[in-house]
Image (tube, helix red, strand yellow):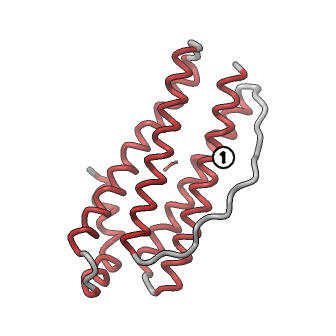
Amino acid sequence: MNATIENLLNNQIKYEAQASLQYLAMASWADAEGYNGVADFFYSQSEEERLHMTKLVKFVNERGGKVIVSALDKPKDSYQGLNELFEQFLESEMFVTEQINHVIYECLEHKDYNVHNFMQWYVTEQLEEEAMARTLLDKLNIIGSDKSGHYLFDRDINAIAAAQEKE
Ligand code: FEO
């Protein structure tokens, strides 16, 4: 495997792991604040990111590359409210999308069509996750600081997420 691509995939393993840890901290914050629906949503997002990470680890190993499992940064674990939480969610997804686009660009530069093909799954996944984060943040922006609105958002978030996934 080309050393630049191997390095980029190892970075991507770290970003997916960092997102998983970040969403776990978000889930725990929401759990402690009594937002059970939001907590379930982020526990499940955290699991998904873990799968994204593992899929990359297995792929690099299958291709005979050397996987590096890196140390992670401590995730942010306190938020002013749901709006800040979901702003951070969208920011995190946008960062991951940017990194994936960078991997794709380098694959084409190095004519590594195998990795390029593998990464298409991540491109699709990112489109969905970014759309989801935007939809949820849009809803929260409409709700503003209304407490009963937040109550309904927490109650309905998993239904909203499931409906969005079907689109
Ligand atoms: Fe796997 Fe949402 O980044």
Q: Residue at x 70, y 31 (%)?
A: 7
Q: Residue at x 56, y 12 (%)?
A: 111
Q: Is residue 165 above or below residue 37?
A: above
| Image location of residue 59, percent across then percent down | 66, 34
For the N terminus, which image quadrant?
A: top right
Please tell me whether residue 142 is drawn above or below residue 131 in the rendered image. Answer: below
Kindly identify the residue that appears in the image at 40 percent across and 65 percent down: 86
The image quadrant of residue 133 is bottom left
Residue sitting at the far top: 111
Secondary element at image label 1: helix
Residue at x 64% of width, y 32% of height? 8
- Between 16 and 140, which is closer to the camera in this rendering? 140
Residue at far front of view: 80
The type of residue carrying mark 1 is Lys
Residue placed under numbered mark 1 in the picture: 14
Residue 45 lies, in percent from the top left, at 50, 60
Residue 28 at x, y percent in the picture: 56, 76
Q: Quadrant of residue 20?
A: bottom right
